[in-house]
Image (cartoon, rainbow, N blue to C red):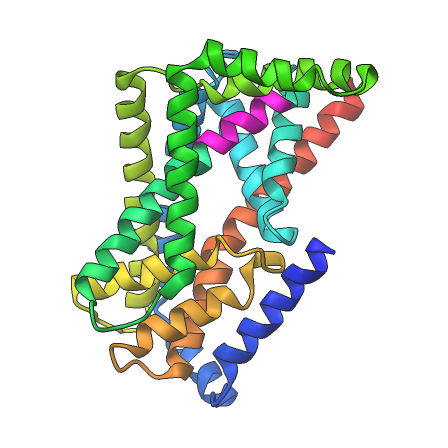
Amino acid sequence: MYRFAGILVSVFFVYLAVRQVDVSESLRALGTVRPGWLVAATLVYLSSFPVRALRWRLILRVQKTLPLGELISAVFVGYMANNVLPARAGEVYRAHFLGRRAGISRSGVAASIVVERTLDGLMLACVILFVFVAFPKEDYLGATALGTGLIFLALAAGILLYSIKADPARRAIERGLERLPRALHERLVGRLGSFLRGIRGISTARELMEAGAYTVLAWVLDAGAVALVVTSFGVTLPPVGYVLVFALVALSTTLPSGPGFVGPFQYAFVLSLGSFAVSRETALAVSVAAQLSLLGSVTLIGLVLLWREQLRAKAR
C-alpha cells in the first residue's frame, strides 16, 4: 500500500512538472548540455560518498569498527536501492546489507542510519530556513517544508535526550515491554537493545562536531554537483539561486515517491529555476540530466558492487 502511494505521488508531480511543457523543446534543450560540466558534476557528487562513509563509521564505532572501503560499498548499495525501490526502501536494504556482511545487528545498523538521516534532516532544516529568509515573499516550500523540518528537529531532540538520559530511558522502555506477551517480549528485547545502542553512536560533543563537519561537507559537495548540472546548460544563477534549487531538490528526495524520485525531482527543478526566468522546458531538461548523471551513476556503481558481493557469497 505504501509503495502504491509512492507511485501515486510520483505521477502527481510528473503532471505538475510537464504540464504546459513542449516536450520537443525540452529534448532540444537536453541536446545543448555541455558534457564536460556534466562529468564534473558527477565526480563531485560521487566524492560525497566517501565522506558519508566516514560519518557512518564514526556513528557505527560504538558497535564495531569497520573498514572504510566496506562502508563505502554499503553506502553505494543503499543509495542504489533508494533509487530503484519506491518510498526510500533502500535504507532498510542498506541495514540488511551491512548487517549481514559485517556480522553485526541489523537493528543496530538501522539505528545508525536513523542518526545519519537526522543529521541530514537538520542540515535540510538549515537550508530551508535560509530559503525562507532569502525569499520571504515567496511560498516555495510551504507547510510541507516546515513539517519536514520540525520532524527532524524532534528526532534530533529525542536522540540527544536519550544520549543524556540513556539508563533511565532504557529502564522505562523495558518496563513498557514487560506488559507485552512473553514471546513477543523476548523477541523485541534483544533487537531493541541493539537499536538503542546504535542510537547512541554519537554521545560526546566532539563526536557531534565531527559528524556535523562530515555532514556539512557532504551537503556542500551535493549542492556543488547540482550547481554544475545547472551550469552545464549555460544557465547562470546568483548564489542564492543555486541554494534555492538545491533546497527544493533535497526536499524532493524526502518524499515517499516512486523509484528514482521521479516526479518530485522534476518539479523541484521546474519550480526553482522558473523563479529565475528559466523556461519550464529547459528546467525539465536539467532535471533529467541531473537524474541520469547523478542518480544514474550511483545506481550503476551500486549494482556493480551488489553483483560483486553476490559473486563472493556464492564462492564461499
Q: Is residue 129 left or right of residue 16?
A: left
Q: In the rendered image, which quarter contains the C terminus?
A: top right
Q: Nearer the viewer, residue 51 or 271?
A: 271
Q: Nearer the viewer, residue 265 or 289?
A: 265
**Across the whole image, how many numbered discs are drawn on residues?**
0
From the top left corner, tell me how far across and down residue 89 is, in percent: 63, 45
Q: In the rendered image, which quarter contains the N terminus?
A: bottom right
Q: Is residue 122 above or below residue 85?
A: above
**Residue 306 among those drawn in magenta:** no
Q: Is residue 134 left or right of residue 288?
A: left
Q: Which stretch is magenta?
A: 107-115
Q: Is residue 221 visible?
A: no
Q: Nearer the viewer, residue 82 or 194?
A: 194
Q: Could you say which quadrant of the image residue 117 lies in?
A: top left
From the top left corner, tell me how far across and down residue 179 is, in percent: 72, 18
The secondary structure making up most of the magenta span is helix
Q: Is residue 288 above or below residue 122?
A: below
From the top left corner, tell me how far across and down residue 34 is, in percent: 34, 69
Give the residue at the far right of this rendering. 183
From the top left corner, tell me how far across and down residue 123 is, in percent: 32, 43
Q: Could you say which quadrant of the image residue 7 lies in?
A: bottom right
Q: Is residue 136 visible?
A: yes
Q: Nearer the viewer, residue 217 or 232?
A: 217
Residue drawn at (75%, 17%), measured in percent from left and top? 185
Q: Is residue 255 left or right of residue 29?
A: right
Q: Is residue 152 above or below residue 285?
A: above
Residue drawn at (44%, 33%), measured in percent from left and top? 116
